[in-house]
Image (cartoon, rainbow, N blue to C red):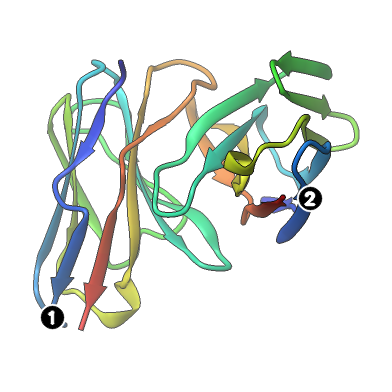
């Protein structure tokens, strides 16, 4: 059974803090993605990675960075959290090549105070 | 830019049939996905269309017309557990990478 896990279901941080969100997949997938999901705006792509140490900007990368040191792990970093980064963050992974189904983790609801 | 439209909300009755439409204007089209997302949970894969026509999978079917930029998800014999948000997502190829662009989702409420 496919499995994507995220380090926390709920997280509360203060403005200006550095925040790490971790995602791990056990399917040996090359591609990994970070999205945020907000009411009325849907899922928006922040960053994605198609290989270890590779990263590409998505539609809304500002204020975020990522790290992919191992194939199974993809981290999203908020260098200095702000209140407008309060959101649900979803990680996904997929096999390489073509339009492949993305498998999602359970999400992390981040609140920045 | 990319544009994907789907209705915000729909309501239907248990046992009925409902059709959720999705229209898109994109470049680099590489297929269309439908996902189901229950409140507080992760999206889960329902269907994928890359060629024109209807794909049937049990109570759920999905249709695609690439020339019209149009897809629909058809849910038959509705059950209460089908109350969820349904996400239309277009797969785009860009510089050799495949990414998904999502619509805002359609919240379906099934009533007894």
Left-right relation of A70 to B82? left
Identified at 40% across, 43% down, the residue is B42
Mark 2 or 1: the one toward you: 2
Mark 1 lies on a secondary structure that is: loop
Position of A15 relative to B111 (above/below): below
Q: Quadrant of residue A42?
A: bottom right
Residue occupied by mark 2: B12
- In depth, the one of A106 and A38 nearer the eye is A106
Left-right relation of A31 to A76? right
Mark 2 lies on a secondary structure that is: strand
Chain of the residue under label 2: B
Q: Residue A19 appears at what percent x and percent y?
A: 12, 64
Identified at 63% across, 51% down, the residue is B103
Q: Quadrant of residue A54?
A: top left
Q: Quadrant of residue B17?
A: top right
Say which mark, if any, is on residue A34.
none
């Amino acid at each position: 059974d496919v499995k994507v896990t995220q380090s926390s279901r709920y997280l509360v941080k203060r403005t200006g803090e550095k925040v790490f969100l971790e995602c791990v997949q056990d399917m040996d997938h090359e591609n990994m993605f970070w999205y945020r999901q907000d009411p009325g705006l849907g899922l928006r792509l922040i960053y994605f990675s198609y290989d270890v140490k590779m990263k590409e900007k998505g539609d809304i990368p500002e204020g975020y960075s990522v790290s992919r040191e191992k194939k199974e792990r993809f981290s999203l970093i908020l260098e200095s959290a702000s209140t407008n980064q309060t959101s649900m963050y979803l990680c996904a992974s997929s096999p390489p090549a073509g339009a492949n189904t993305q498998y999602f983790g359970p999400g992390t609801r981040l609140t920045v105070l | 830019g990319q544009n994907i439209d789907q209705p915000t909300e729909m309501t239907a009755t248990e046992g009925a049939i409902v059709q959720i439409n999705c229209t898109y204007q994109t470049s680099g089209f590489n297929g269309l996905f439908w996902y189901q997302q229950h409140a507080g949970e992760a999206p889960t894969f329902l269907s994928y269309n890359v060629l024109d026509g209807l794909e049937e999978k049990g109570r759920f079917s999905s249709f695609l017309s690439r020339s019209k930029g149009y897809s629909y998800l058809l849910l038959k014999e509705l059950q209460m557990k089908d109350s969820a948000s349904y996400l239309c997502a277009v797969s785009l190829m860009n510089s050799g990478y495949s990414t998904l662009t999502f619509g805002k989702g359609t919240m379906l409420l099934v009533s007894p």
